[in-house]
Amino acid sequence: MTARPWWLPAGVLGLGCVFAFTTQRQRLPALQAPLATLPVELAGRAGTDRRLSPAEEEVAGMTTYLFRAFGSDSSPEFTVYVGFYERQTQGRTIHSPKNCLPGAGW
């Protein structure tokens, strides 16, 4: 059995540190087009844009979003929500279902 060089673990650890500190922490994705350009008609139903309350926007922390109701204004058949997060940092991450679904979660 051949003994490993004493410096091998230190070299591997050092190389790992170099890679960890020289790589980009987070790439900033860019939207290819504004969310408002998504189809206004879906499954044969016309859509109407809606706004979240300022409190909901603050909790969710998204950069931009689209919230569109499809069907009649008085009782939409379904809604579509798309949130875009330019950067996810502490306190500004994709929110938990307990923040957006009634009953504190699933």
Image: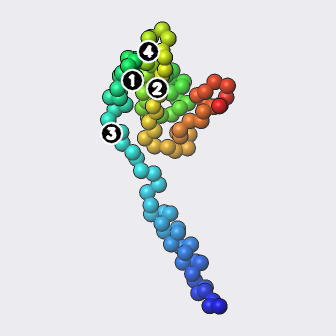
Please tell me whether residue 41 is drawn above or below residue 64 in the rendered image.
above
Q: Residue 22 at what x, y percent from top left?
A: 45, 63
The residue carrying pointer 2 sits among few (fewer than 14), some (14 to 19) or many (20 or more) residues within 10 Å by Cα, namely few
Q: Looking at the image, is mark 2 or mark 1 nearer the viewer? A: 1
Crowding near the residue tagged with mark 4, few <14, some 14–19, many ≥20 C-alpha atoms within 10 Å: some
Mark 2 or mark 3, earlier in chain: 3
Residue 71 visible here? yes
User: Where does label 1 land, which residue?
Assistant: 42
Q: Label 2 to label 1, Cα distance in Å?
A: 10 Å
Q: CA distance from mark 2 to mark 4?
A: 12 Å
Q: Are marks 2 and 1 in contact (CB under 8 Å)?
A: yes
| Residue type of the residue flagged with mark 2 | Val
CB within 8 Å, label 2 to label 4: no
Q: Which residue is mark 3?
A: 32
Please give the name of the residue rendered at 54% of the width and 25% of the height, measured from the top-left corner: 56
Q: Which residue sits at x=55%, y=30%?
A: 59
Kindly indicate the quadrant of the structure image that contains residue 48. top left
- Mark 2 or mark 3, which is nearer to you? 2
106, 90: nearer the viewer? 106
Is residue 20 toward the left or the right of residue 43 in the image?
right
Residue bearing mark 2: 80
Dividing the picture into quadrants, the one containing residue 2 is bottom right
Residue type (three-letter) at the residue carrying disc 1: Leu
Helix or strand or loop: what does disc 4 sit on?
Answer: strand
SS type, badge 3: loop
Q: Identify residue for label 4.
A: 71
Q: Earlier in the sequence, mark 2 or mark 4?
A: 4
Give x and y (percent) for residue 23: 44, 61
Q: Are marks 2 and 3 in contact (CB under 8 Å)?
A: no
- Image coordinates of residue 83 in percent, x first then y, are 46, 33
The amino acid on which the numbered mark 4 sits, given as a three-letter code, is Gly
